[in-house]
Image: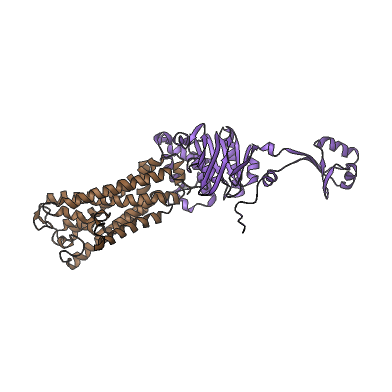
Amino acid sequence: MIRTHALTKRFGSLTAVDSVDLDVRPGDIYGFLGANGSGKTTTVRMLLGLVMATSGSIELLGQPIPAAAGRVLDQVGAMVEGPGAYGHLSGRANLELLDGSGSRRARGARRDRAERVAQALEQVGLSGVGRRPVKAYSLGMRQRLGLAAALLRKPRLLVLDEPTNGLDPQGIREIRDLLLHLHACGTTIFLSSHLLAEVEQLCTRVGVLDRGRLIVQAQLEELQAPTGRTLVRTPDATAALALLNGRVEHRDGETLLVRGDDPAALNALLVSQGIRVRELGPERRSLEQTVLELTGPSADRVEGG
Amino acid sequence: MIQVELLKLFRRPRTWMTIGLLDALPTIVAILLAITGIGPRPGQGPAFLSAVLSNGSLFAVAALAIVLPLFLPVAVAVVAGDTIAGEAQSGTLRYLLIRPVGRTRLLVSKLVSVFAFVCVAVLVVAGTGYFVGRLLLGNQPLSAAVTSVSGTSLTANQIAGRTALAIGYVAFSMLGVAAVALFLSTVTDSALSATMGALAILIGSSLLLTIDASRALQPYLPTRYWLSFIDLFRDPILWRNVLRGVALQGVYVAVLLGAAWANFTTKDVTS
């Protein structure tokens, strides 16, 4: 769906995006992670033909960008760096204007316009908002409107940059459910975010950008693979320590970290010796650990020389 | 797309407020003239004002002459400066481009909507001028002869035709302003900067016109021939400056629109 080769963007002497090879497959929910200033937004803008690449190539739905932008982008819904709308018009009027924009081929039949707009508003939970102008909307409502605009043309690929910005926890949950529903209906989703938890809950595939370079691109499960150690919580920690002598790597109160990747066997051993087990399972790395290990300090941290 | 742009422009309250304000000044002038009956001496003040006391139909042209030096260019620069930069500011430019709307198509639609604004503004000012002039100032019968700027008489038909020409000429001159502002609008992401930049160029041009030392430059300054539409009311019509004005504006419009296109279609949209 998205494939880039050695994609690079320089602004003067600053290299914002450095030789990035993205590979987003059909059916993915791709989490594009990176700290603020790591080049996420510039990459997304290049994918959509807004910013011209310095070198490298982009393929979107199998077509070259920006050359084929006019043919491809009508199958792509996107939200880039927050929503945009005319403040003096209502959300509905904004969507109607957007729906009427573009070449005849891209914009769809006029008589279905009201219906398309109503459907998009309904999907994001704004159907009852009425004639209120957008400038009176809350941040969360604007975000929803931006999402409605992206959904307007029933895209095959959805490119979202920080879609849950400004939403409350219920709103985030709703949007997540909506995205999962769209994904189940066959939409590929490219989600750019700096919120690790959000990506961890939603995505199937992850790419991590650090200071312009793509340092990881893998299925989420690979990144969360078990570490070969087992985590045990037991009120009889001292007894367990004695029993497993040498296999315990770390003890913190009731919690033991035991070498060995067979929790079932470990459990049987502990119970057979009369040691009570409160909790037991394979240790998994969290996405956060992986990402923090791989990336340097935050990009918006500026230290004196 | 053009339809959408026109809808955006004319559904915006600001557009109509601007046109309303444009009409206010000539109307105030007409009221003052009607009450006091004191016209400027011939050769002083805005063109035609001395003539309108006897014949109100000329006030359409007089109204144009009143708003032409400052108010009309300001209005046009505001609307044209807002075209691309305004979309950038409200964050809608990127969504239009990924809709997708081709960049050339967007620019052309914006240009058409600005041109529509210029035409509507000029026509409304001329229409209001005519109406107010007939109502408040000397309302000789329409068929009565009018004294031309050269002193001879013009028939009502001649006046109507020449007024139409003058309206066209003023509209074309304003297209030059629109081209400057549209170009600047593709350069900056701030609508105000684009508008102010365009006005700065116009004010600079008007200033240079008053300085003898810049005589060599004067034939090429954008505002040089703006008021030449007065020549249309000489008898016979003095075409020289009018034609030069059209040619000069044509060059400005072509070059600036070319520059706007070249800049906009290759630039990184980071707004």
Depth check, front residue: A12 or B232: A12
Depth check, front residue: A203 or A124: A203
In-image side of A234 versus A46 (left or right): right
In-image side of A153 versus A168 (left or right): left
Can you give x and y, in whole percent of width and height, for residue A14 in the image? 54, 49
Can residue B163 be seen? yes
In-image side of B46 versus B71 (left or right): left
Can you give x and y, in whole percent of width and height, for residue A288 in the image? 68, 46
**Chain B drawing hue:** brown
From the rendered image, report the letter of the chain displayed in purple: A
Quarter of image, res A240: top right
For the N terminus of chain B, the image quarter is top left
In-image side of B180 versus A9 (left or right): left
User: How many callouts does the rendering have?
Assistant: 0
Can residue A203 be seen? no
Depth check, front residue: A285 or B157: A285
Can you give x and y, in whole percent of width and height, for residue A243 in the image? 90, 42
Depth check, front residue: A105 or A94: A105
Can you give x and y, in whole percent of width and height, for residue A44 in the image? 53, 42
Quarter of image, res A41: top right
With respect to residue B31, does A124 lie above or below? above
Query: Which residue occupies 65% across, 42% down?
Result: A200
Query: Which residue occupies 8% across, 56% down?
Result: B152
